[in-house]
Image: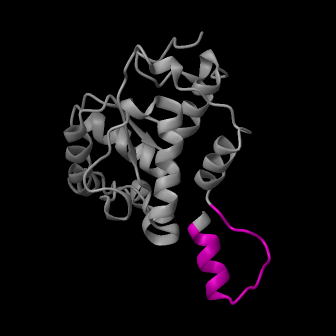
Amino acid sequence: MTFAVLEGLKKFGIKTDLEIASIYQYYAKWIREGKLKVNSDWNKDLKIKFTVQDPCQIVRKSYGDPVAEDLRYVVRSVVGDENFIDMTPNRSNNYCCGGGGGYLQSGYVEARHQYGKVKFDQIVATGADYCVAACHNCHAQIHDLAEHFEGKYHTVHLWTLICLAMGVLGENERTYLGPDLAEVGL
């Protein structure tokens, strides 16, 4: 959606004094300023490992590596720096998950799985227990890839982790998490 706004403004020559930014940039800013009070202590003893998917539209097509750094700052802030494993390649060079641009809803499931196998293998190579997918299309695709290829990782939304790290994640908001996170902080 952010990419669409940026491209629409450019295509139609619309001038605005509005700041068009990614929510990842705001999360990072608010954490740095102490306005979004997160804490990674919940994962000190559990040592659950996380990796992160760089969404194509926000990172590669819109804001580049600076927003990828903000995304990593947020993830490290909520899970602990020692529990973050980066994919290789990453940031602007990260592989597409294969679910964006409408492909997730296109009906070409076999082709989507074949294309997404590169992402699946990349996630598995990290050894992470969870892949943080801040983009909804990435989340759905990466989750589907784990089910299809019988991956041992779970997929989690960034906002879910932020809520967990703030101690406000509700019991009913944990249904898709693995058993290792299902009762953390309850």
Estimate the x, y position of residue 43 in percent, counting from the top left: 46, 20
Which stretch is magenta? 3-21
Between 33 and 169, which is closer to the camera in this rendering? 33
| Residue lying furthest bottom | 13
Residue 108 seen in the figure: yes
Q: Residue at x 25, y 52 (%)?
A: 88
Count the marks.
0
Task: Please tell me whether residue 101 belongs to the stretch shown in magenta.
Answer: no
Using the image, determine if residue 103 lies above or below residue 173: below
Q: Is residue 99 left or right of residue 41?
A: left
Quarter of the image holding residue 32?
A: top right
Q: Residue at x 46, y 51 (%)?
A: 137
Q: Is residue 112 left or right of residue 73?
A: left
Task: Please tell me whether residue 7 belongs to the stretch shown in magenta.
Answer: yes
Quarter of the image holding residue 139?
A: top left
Residue 101 seen in the figure: no
Query: Which image quarter is the C terminus in?
Result: top right
Using the image, determine if residue 114 lies above or below residue 170: below
| Residue lying furthest right | 17
Estimate the x, y position of residue 59 in percent, counting from the top left: 46, 63
